[in-house]
Amino acid sequence: MPTDPHTPTFAEIVRVACEVADPNGSDDRVTDLLVRFEDRDEPVTTVADVEEELAEAHGIIDPDRDSEPLRNAVAVGTYLAFRRDEINDDPADLIRRANAAEEV
């Protein structure tokens, strides 16, 4: 039995972030973010700059940055890349902590 916890892939982090930010799948821009990264099967720890990749995708998908669900998905994705142990935490708590981390 392995003693190391599972390291999620970049795609898993983005999927969780999108589910947290848009649980009903009603924002097409969040869906676009999910599709953009769905094939990124490398461990998130090997991605050179998660924050930059998510920010770049955010700017492409929503140049006016007027989608709150997408903004939350990007914040949560960035947060979970560094706080992988919180991947199963309460969605509202994740959004709150991710947005607080963005303000720092």
Image: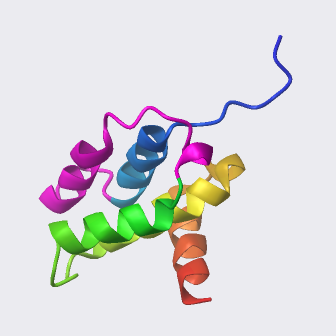
Q: Looking at this rendering, what residue extends furthest in the front direction?
A: 48
Q: Is residue 73 visible?
A: no
Quadrant of the rendering where the C terminus is positioned = bottom right
38 magenta-colored: yes
Give the residue furthest to the top: 1
Instruction: Please report the bounds of the magenta region as a residue range.
Output: 22-47
Q: Relative to 53, does residue 2 appear above or below in the rendering?
A: above
> Percent x, y for residue 37?
32, 45
State which quarter of the image contains the N terminus: top right
Residue appearing at x 15%, y 84% in the figure: 64
Q: Please report the residue visible at 23 percent of the width from the left and 74 percent of the height from the top.
A: 59
Q: Position of residue 36 (x, y in %)?
A: 24, 47
Observer-nearest of 90 and 35: 35
**In the image, is 3 to the left or to the right of 53?**
right
Q: Residue furthest bottom?
A: 103
Q: Is residue 50 visible?
A: yes
Q: Quadrant of residue 65?
A: bottom left
Q: Is residue 44 magenta?
A: yes
In the figure, residue 67 lies in which quadrant?
A: bottom left
The structure's colour scheme is: rainbow
**Side of 78 relative to 35 (left or right):** right
Residue in view at x 54 percent, y 81 percent: 102
Count of numbered badges drawn on the protein: 0
Image location (x, y in percent) of residue 89? 62, 51
Residue 49 higher or lower than 45, as above or below? below
Relative to 83, is 95 above or below?
below
